[in-house]
Structure formats: structure tokens, C-alpha cells
Amino acid sequence: MSLKPAVSKTDHAQGNVDADLVIVEYGDYQCPYCGAAYPVLKELMKEFGSQIKFVFRNFPLSEMHRYARPAALAAEAANLQGKFWEMHDAIYENQQDLNENFLMKLAEKLKLNIPEFDKDLESTELANKVDADFESGIISGVNGTPSFFVNGNKFNGGAEDLLELVRENVK
Amino acid sequence: MLQKNDVAPDFTLFATPDQKIKLSEFKGKNVILAFYPADWSPVCSDQMALYNETLKFFKQYDAELFGISVDSKWCHLAFSQSRNLHFPLLADFEAKGEIARKYGVYDEEEGECKRALFVINKDGIIEWSYLSPTAINPGADGILEALETLKTK
């Protein structure tokens, strides 16, 4: 199964954006397995950040996780103020406290412009962005969270397996 | 396992403790049958929980989704409530696995349904079927592709 659409400029990327190795995560901010994957992915990027382009796409399982979608919107709203990864990290680092009020507290802590942030949370554009990410996941064969794609192909393993694969293959 | 162009065997199964669903009553609609081994598999990679999120995509193709396992109607009720599912789970419970056998997707050894998908067209003919490794959630991409093919016919 391959990634559709391919990674583009509209994606959130970190690491070396020109790297040959591109890893995409489809994640849900309230999913405990994504929470468990987070420090492993941090380690991956600490060790190999100069050789990996890492992309995050939203895959909120909204029926199961009531704060997954609000959290995805909060990260997208933070992105409009240039702080996507700061919000992404702050949510995963405090996953057990996740709720709408806590997202506002994180926004304050990240010194976001709050009236702007508030307005953006309600915007159709951001809602469409989250929906588009989700739909791309579905047609790409995402079957749960987290799901990873390595250079456009579905990786059938978790974050630990991914770290192991990279350690074995990237020098 | 039944394949493309086979007639989908009709059945009547409990969807809730007091309501049965008859497949042939859905002629004129596309139907997705998702046979799966058991209720209560791990949460975030659960196939039924995933389909619960993709219902609106199925609806765009005028398709109804039914999950089917050998769990009882009471077990389905609890599972469905726990996961907030918005589609019916059918109980292939008495005689156990009878419908799964008719579709060729019963696992005799485990006494459970295999993990298998069928997309049935508006005339009750199987358009697409897929047997997934039991441990792997097949996702929704295959179903959507099959529905897309139906639409462009």
C-alpha cells in the first residue's frame, strides 16, 4: 500500500527536509499507542535527524477519542503561528491531561496569540485540513494509529521496529 | 471463499437483542460485509473502530456496512456501546458460524470467522472479496476502491 497523496509542501515536516529517507506518521493525539511511540520517534530524530524527513499527518479516531480532533485542530492552529511541532510535542508530552481547557493552557504557554488561536480553531479551512489528512490515510491503507510510511510505502510495524530498521540501515 | 460474481447468500441475523437484519432487504443498496474473529480486540488498531470513522466515506457510495462475528447479540451490544459504533454488528451465533461457512470464511480450528471483506452490489452479487491475515486489520482502502469501481460501471 502506498501513500496517497505523496508528501508535499502542505505537510508538517521536521528533520532534514531534503533527506532521501522520508517517514510519515499518521497519528491521533489521544491514542495511547501514539503516546508510547512519541519518545521513540524523538530518539529516532535525535540520532538520525540529519538524514530523515519526518512528516506528521492527522488521523484522529474521533468516535473513540473525544479530544483527538480538538487536539489536531489545536496543533494546526498553532501551525498558523509557526509553532506546529511545539504544540505537537507539548500534547504528546502531556497526553494524560488532554482536554479542551488544557489545550488552551498549552497555547498560552507557547505564547500564541490567543484571540487568533481561538478563531482559527473554528475555521473551516483547518477542519478541512484535518479531514483531508484523515481521508488520505484511509485511501493509503492506514488501519490504526500510529501508522508509518517509509518512502511512500506502508511500514507494518511500530515505532520501535522503525527505529531498529533505521539503525540497521542508516549509517 | 466466495469470489467476484458469486451470488451473495442471503441470511437473517440478529443485529440487536430484538432486531434481525435480512440481507436481501438491502437490494438496491451496496452492502459491505466485514467478517472478523471477535469483539474486544485491542483498541486503536481495531477494525470495527476504524470503520466507525469511515462510515461517511461508505455512505458517499450508498453502501451499508455490517460487521459479522460469532459473538452473541449481547456481546455485540456491549462492544458496540463501549466503542460507540454507528453500524450494526451481526451475530453469526446460532447455528454458530453458519453464515461465515456459506461465504467460505469460517475458521474451524479457532471457531471464529476469518477476517474477510465482501462488497456486494445493488443486485446482491459479490463485486469484491478479500481475505486478510487474521492478525492484520485490512483497513478501508480496498473497500473504497471496490465501491469506486462499482460507481464507474
Image (tube, coloured by chain):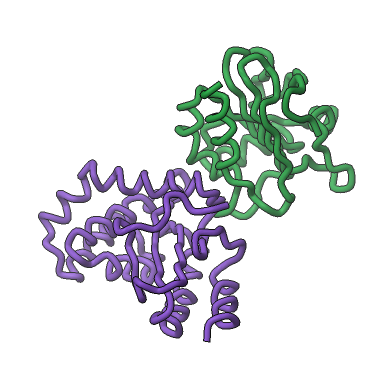
Chain colours: A purple, B green
Quadrant, the C terminus of chain B: top right
In the image, what residue occupies the spot 64% across and 29% down?
B119
Foreground residue among B114 and A2: A2
In the image, what residue occupies the spot 72% across and 31% down?
B91
In the image, what residue occupies the spot 69% across and 31% down?
B73
Q: Is residue B24 above or below residue A12?
A: above
In the image, what residue occupies the spot 45% across and 57% down?
A26
Q: Position of residue B33 (x, y in %)?
A: 66, 31
Q: Residue furthest right?
A: B109
Q: Is residue A10 left or right of residue A113?
A: right
Foreground residue among B60 and A64: B60
Q: Is residue A77 above or below residue B53?
A: below
Q: Position of residue A27 (x, y in %)?
A: 44, 59
Quadrant, the N terminus of chain B: top right
Q: Is residue A79 left or right of residue B101?
A: left
| Quarter of the view holding residue A97 | bottom left
| Quarter of the view holding residue A94 | bottom left
Foreground residue among A8 and B86: A8
Task: Report the label total.
Answer: 0
| Quarter of the view holding residue B107 | top right
Q: Position of residue A160 (x, y in %)?
A: 57, 74
